[in-house]
Image (spheres, rainbow, N blue to C red):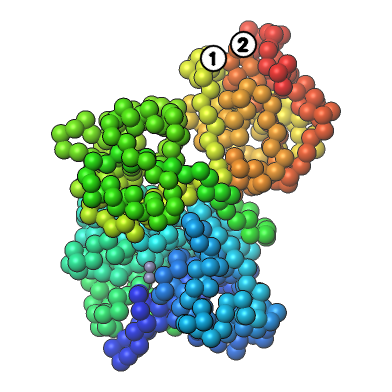
Amino acid sequence: MRVRVWGARGSLATPGPSTVRYGGNTSCFEITSPSGALIIIDCGTGMRELGQHLRAAQPAPHRGHILISHTHWDHIQGIPFFEPFFTPGNTWDLYAPKGVRQSLRQALEGQMQYSYFPVRLDELGAEIRFHELVEGTFQIADVTIRTRYLNHPALTFAYRLEAEGAAIVYASDHEPHSRHLADGTGHVAGEDLRHCEFLKSADLVIHDAQYLATEYPQKIGWGHSTVEYAITVCRLARVRRVVLTHHDPGRDDDAIDRIVANARSNLQDAGCAMEVAAAKEGTALSIAGTGIRTGGAECTDPAIAHASAFGNPLILIAVADRLAADTLLDAAHADQIPAMEVGSSDAVLRAIGEKAPTLIVLEQQEGAVGPLELCKKIRGLRAGRDLPVIVVADTEDAQKGMAAGVTDWLIRPFSSAYARTRMRAWLLRTAARWVRAPMPPDEEQRLATLHSLGILDTPAEQRFDRLTRLAAGILRVPVALVSLVDRERQWIKSAHGVDIRQTPRESSFCAHAVAARELLVVPDALADDRFGDNPEVAGGSRVRFYAGCPLFVGQSCVGTLCVLDVRPRQLSSEQVDLLKDVANLVERELQPTGPAVASNGHAAG
Ligand SMILES: [Zn+2]
Ligand SMILES: [Zn+2]
């Protein structure tokens, strides 16, 4: 992939003699994929020159994709000045975080209203298509793109682009989740650790580094990283090269030079080979992979990780501090999200069962039993297992929080805008179209039966391989598996058409069939609210069709015989019967005391 910098200034364009070398234009980066697809990241004022360059470099029509991190001014101000938007015949796809009560189109229309600009958005000549995203994975030409929410007072995405084994991450407008990490020291945990995982092993990370640690105390809550934090998280993530961006408008060229020189000498002293530079307008980089393999490089329509609905959100607020509680209620109110205050721990636990909230905010109180204990109890409830729990506190205790199952921390003091963004992010996350399978009520007994078979982690055997081959052949599907659902994984006893031994239980289709104890057919996973954003669908193996028939040993459902395809499809009732017939043969092979133990599973089919 090739990267070219058109704007790297944060907050406000800052032209002038002291910013000539790094440039004064706000954020805009151009990426060209190995197959030649054009992907622009952010539409700051640098976008104007990029538009002129595109026009000069090749004749219309122009076709491209634009990833917008968020709609703060400095990331969209170039849009009305981007010439290729005015030319009929050009086609542009715009991607940005899905808003809560305002669409991407409305947000962009705002800055082009009559009072601010003479041309309206709908008067632009080019065809512009809007795509609203939540966290997930999608494809643009030969590039696989992953999104992740950053920590900023607006819903903001980091984008990870992978193609031909190379990975580039753009993470601008992001504040450390834990403020104690701003000086680059301290234990990285929780959401900051997840941020690291998103950057992991990237060949290039373009990272927000607006402030220095010494400036940070005056900038808390403004939504930006320090140079020290950016370098720490990139080092931990074993990033090959980091490019610092979103330069503070008050930073002149010499100051940026000093920052880079200082960072380089610190890394050298630490014996770290990571390269550091500051984003500089006009520079171009060529990024080759270091061997990360991505999934298939086939071209697909952009399959957008859209949230089908914001659902019926309800926020439960158990916060005694009146100021904090009012700030949270304000924030929920601004998004017209119902919120309910609850007093005691018992009331919280009761409300989870009765009201089915989609988010809980607890407060850590000195001396009281405390939210961590309560959080543990919530995790013990069936309805509370996957519920996002945010804890309000003066300081964060990441390790204890993780052990208790805390999802995120809201550290005082915080503004209503900040609280609003955190709550939105967690609500939208839960609106993602991916549902983990419920735990079967007989889980422990089921696992005991499975383990007693002594089959897990044994080598492949012809007696099973024959049956998966048969199932794939008669149903004309590329893949058939005998999958056994273990505590944390599904382990594959036999795989026809694919070389896998195990996958995580949380993304397992078979776990759904096992929990329901009946045949599960998913004709098109991408169109299914339970599976649309499942990583096996959105990324990796690109499953579109699934049919799994449960396998019983005695009363316990231990796994499935399943068939998969990368295309959507239907099964006729005759084919369903054939699948059940083969599953019956697999069941016979599974029985601990030889074949022919009666099974009760398929009658319910
Ligand atoms: Zn910005
Ligand atoms: Zn911003």
Q: Is residue 473 left or right of residue 124?
A: right
The type of residue carrying mark 2 is Gly
Name the one closer to the observer, 217 or 319: 319
- Numbered mark located on residue 529 in the image: none
| Marks 2 and 1 close (CB-CB < 8 Å) | yes
Q: Is residue 559 left or right of residue 250?
A: right
Percent of width and height locating residue 399:
26, 40
The quadrant in which the C terminus is found is: top right
Assign ligand 1 to one image quadrant: bottom left
Q: Residue at x 20, y 48 (%)?
A: 394
The type of residue carrying mark 1 is Thr
Q: Secondary structure at mark 1?
A: helix
Percent of width and height locating residue 192:
33, 51
- Numbered mark located on residue 554 in the image: 2
Q: Which residue is mark 1?
A: 449
Percent of width and height locating residue 66:
55, 70
Percent of width and height locating residue 480:
70, 34
Name the one closer to the observer, 572 or 127: 127
Mark yes or no: residue 411 visible.
yes
Mark yes or no: residue 237 visible.
no
